[in-house]
Image: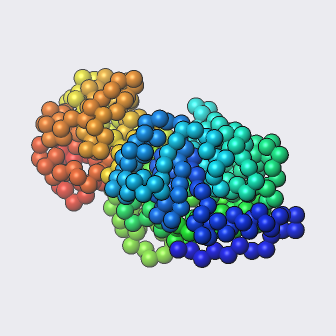
Amino acid sequence: MATVCVEPMEREERPGTAAALAEKIRNRTARVGVIGLGYVGLPLSLELCGAGFDVTGIDVQAGKVEAINAGRSYIQDVDGARLADMVAAERLRATADFSVIRELDTLTIAVPTPLRKTKDPDMTYVVAACEQVARYAHPGLLVILESTTYPGTTDELVLPMLEVSGLRVGTDFFLCFSPERVDPGNALYQTANIPKVVGGITPACTELGALLYGQALERVVRVSSTKVAEMVKLLENTFRMINIGMVNEMALLCEGMGIDVWEVIDAAATKPFGFMPFYPGPGLGGHCIPIDPYYLSWKTRQTGMEARFIELAGAINGQMPHFVAEKIQNALNDRSKPLRGARVLVMGVAYKRNIDDVRESPALDVMHVLRSRGAEVSYSDPYVPRMELGGEVMESVELLDGVGEADCVVIITDHSEFPYREVVERAAMVVDTRNALKGVVSDKIVRL
């Protein structure tokens, strides 16, 4: 566990309130709450339970509340047995009743922050959560926002909402921002061992937030303000989004020049300094990289500046599903088969390998484009037995049966379970957007 010390309070703060909360946190008597029990909130809840805290999870979805209280996990990275043990030991409970906030000492908010169609931040869930917190807030409460958002959200939006209650930050309650860094499907880095960045409105806020997380997580990194903490997450994901955009553009350039982009990247990656390999693909997916940079872009526009790299990378990444569809259409044409009426099997619809999450998955965009051009589209994904596409519920087909019936198989998500060599043997043609068939030689293969 991280070692965290509470430093002296600023003069205007009441040491008693902060000191009393710090003591509760240290001796594990603090009553901990988490609003939002999804990919971020539920794993965090379990780590806090494991550190000895009693945790109350709050979620408006009755199905999640019922599942947790029954000891059932609905998150791939959350071990069901561990969850059941925590519930049985009465360390974890879930509710949809926000009035329990009256009984809590700490509260972490981990609700969705999607984009509107105009690519502006949609703060609906954060506002709704903060309204409930303000309604039941009390002296000595520590509130930590984890939802990814634009710099300034915590002190410009959340703080005024909570101070409506008459409580003063740093004196009566404490407020921090700590960006979530969840990477679904990552067996090496999970909630417990990913460094936790914390920035508070006041130094006491920062120290109390760091103290709480330091009981359960391996390393806590303090920063000087909530704005810095908010910008940290945006820098991390904007860095990835822009570099993915760059390598996707490189793939387009190599395509036009008849160069194997994958070979280029592998050779460049042998350089021991000054280069970090990124890989092209069918487009961006997930709940972070396709969304978070636009929060920064929106905030930048509010200050009269332009986020040119973000907008350009977004445009390049956004065209990749169309490029993949063109690749499929051209490959079929080369075999005297039109796309209209062709049977296309998509291998993998999750946004990345070995997970069950289809949020913002490029597979969905590719399938939409193919359908709009008249193709008959099916999919196979061991992690996604069924999903909705364009208002229609689709079910995953048995892979090798689907391969045998398809005019074209396209690899969108490179799950490790797929029997790639057998797919190539049975398929009429395979379009590989992930270099999953690296080292496999066949005239059936068309690579991105």
Going 64% across and 50% down the picture, which residue do you hit? 103
The x, y position of residue 118, in whole percent, is 62, 32
Q: Nearer the viewer, residue 45 or 401?
A: 45
The x, y position of residue 341, in whole percent, is 24, 23
How was the colour assigned to the protein in this rendering? Answer: rainbow
Q: Nearer the viewer, residue 104 or 82?
A: 104
Going 11% across and 47% down the picture, which residue do you hit? 425
Going 88% across and 64% down the picture, which residue do you hit? 12
The x, y position of residue 33, in whole percent, is 58, 52
The answer to whether one can see residue 196 in this image is: yes
Using residue 46 as the reference point, say whether residue 11 is left or right of it: right
Number of dots carrying numbers = 0
The answer to whether one can see residue 86 in this image is: no
Using residue 289 as the reference point, say whether residue 439 is left or right of it: left
Going 22% across and 29% down the picture, which residue do you hit? 343
The x, y position of residue 430, in whole percent, is 22, 43
Specify the quadrant of the image occupied by residue 339: top left
